[in-house]
Image (cartoon, grey):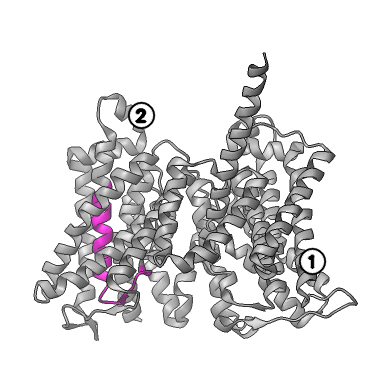
Amino acid sequence: MPIQNSTGSRSFRDILLIAAGFLAIMPILGINRTTDFIIFSIFVLAFNILYGFMGRLSFGHMLYLGSGAYGITLFTEHVSRNPFLAIIASICAGALLGVIVGPIIIRTTGACFALINLAFNQVGYFLVVVAFSKYTGGEDGMSVSFSKFGFIDFSNKPFKFGFVLLCLLGTYYLLRKFTSSPYGILIKSIKENETRVKFLGYNTFNYKWITFIISTSLSAFAGALSIINYGYVTPSFIDPSRAVEVLFAALIGGAGSLYGAIIGGVIYMAISNYLASYIPRWEMFLGFALLVVVFRFRTGIWGAISGKIKSRAKAAPVRTL
Amino acid sequence: MINTIAYGLTIGAILFIISIGLSLTFGTMRIVNFAHGLVYTLGAYFLVSALPLTGNNFILGALIAVLAVIPISYVIERFVIRKLYGISIDYAIIATYAVALIGIDAIKWIWGASPIPLSDPVGIDVSLFGITLPLYRLIIILLAVVVFVALLIFFKKTMVGKIVVAALEDKDAVRGLGISVDKYFTYIFVIGSCLAALGGVLYAPITSVHPYMGMMVLLVSFAVVLVGGLGNIKGTFISAFVLGMVMAITGRYWGPAAETMVFVVMGIVLIFKPIDV
């Protein structure tokens, strides 16, 4: 994977492009759906940090989304209805979860990593739906409301859209900085060959742990934003059987690229929102699509597009000679 | 209490029968086979369809169900699993999960999504140590022991078994001897799938048959494999019965927590015994 040179102007251009893209699809899809798509893209970005950049596939990422979703709900219920404090609290909940379960999870790789995440997700689902159903509302979930401050009103749809879009742009900017920093390069090296990174004298455990915590916190952030968007929480926000959605989005967009994650998020949401109403055998279609991606189309949509751009850029000087 | 122990042994027996295939594919091919849960579910559904055909003869129905899984598992191995050797393990997880998704949707298509109940095929209770137990559960426990002994003999005495054991240690060295390892892996895959189907067949009368029954069992049996050691038959045997006991005892005091407790135990084991795959 080539190291992308990230100058300030380039990430500024990217941010403008993403904002323009979402503003362009907003009139087509409607403001509610677009807000939903943007939040899902943040979740895919969080997942992709772990999967695309560090090469650890988590099959239970709904747990971290759910920690944010239930974190913000419980915070508004018991502490304060200030939305910004609640978001910060939910991010802390995700980070805390990453700190606690991280040391167990990140020692494993490959299949173990995927399934231990899934096992923890199952435990989290059980805790929310059965063990603490008194506080979380169990299967029924509960509704959430936030207090208003002047123009900051989360029941106002355009404001919500703008806020969520700003969140995505901020997340993108931070992750762009993160992945092009020496730290990000180290993470990618761990994906390629962890033994060699260890041999160079780095304590890979700490790097993996921190990356894991970043991913869980960002997922929790996405969870908190979904709660702000929907205004209620249900166990579907922590349901382990939905973990495949984010994986599919990351794969179809192209793992290991920030653009790919956002494109994948939008495309997956578009498929699941529209195609599901036309194709009755929806899960079967998803299964075959996953097989095609794995066997034929491994770099995803963004990988295919950027591959084309690169080969054209290479071919161009030859023609002028 | 004796009742709980008997229940734990039954669960452990079924867990062992299911997990052994998972453990072998994991140990030999380094692939987590999500389709294993699908094969387990298919076994139960084939039994549901076979019972009316055989005039409610459970043994014949079970035999048909287990044998019917062979072509399906061969197709899965030939067209999905075999293509995954050598490429990243993540893609193997995704591809087998995709197969499971397709299969579960096909099951919903053919048999419908609502659960199908099955009655106890033996229906005789025996008195043991002053309590009455269904004979069916004792048969399951016996069957697991028979499978365990048969597998031990298979891996110790037969040529195929010896090749697989050697390949578990060092695949390339076995290939270097001119032995087509992939062919033997196919045998192991099919045997493991048949055992998974047998597990589904045996468990079906205890619970009900529904399309997602495989996914939860797959997770629990994955915990069994991790605790017992990859590709380790004796370890899988012991850990299956221990975790079956954990489920039974937890279930006695707090029903919904039974399966969650298995993952807690797995987490604790992994803290003290990290696994490198």
**Residues at marks 2 and 1, CA–CA distance in whole angstroms:** 52 Å
**From the viewer's perspective, is A219 left or right of B253?**
right
Give the class, few, some or many, for how many residues have Cα within 10 Å of label 1's Cα (few <14, many ≥20). some
- Residue carrying label 2: B172
Q: Residue at x 30, y 59 (%)?
A: B39
Res B110 quadrant in image: bottom left
Residue B207 lies within the magenta run: yes
Which residue is nearer to you in this view: A115 or B82?
A: B82
**From the viewer's perspective, is B159 left or right of A76?**
left
Indicate the position of residue A228 as horizontal and vertical percent values: 72, 73
Asked which secondary structure carries label 2, the reply is helix
State the mark number for residue A88: 1
Give the class, few, some or many, for how many residues have Cα within 10 Å of label 2's Cα (few <14, many ≥20). few
The residue at the far top in this view is A321
Prevailing secondary structure of the magenta residues: helix
Image vertical order of residue A63 relative to residue A10, above or below: below
**Is there one chain holding both mark 2 and mark 1?**
no
Q: Amino acid at mark 1?
A: Ile
Q: Amino acid at mark 2?
A: Asp
Res B219 quadrant in image: bottom left
Indicate the position of residue B157 as horizontal and vertical percent values: 18, 41
Res B142 quadrant in image: bottom left
Can you tell which of label 2 and label 1 is closer to the viewer? 1
Question: In the rendered image, which quarter contains the N terminus of chain B?
Answer: bottom left
Asked which secondary structure carries label 1, the reply is helix
Which residue is nearer to you in this view: B101 or B146?
A: B101
Which chain does the numbered disc 2 sit on? B
Q: Residue at x 32, y 68 (%)?
A: B109
Which residue is nearer to you in this view: B14 or B193?
A: B193
Q: Which residues are magenta?
A: B189-213
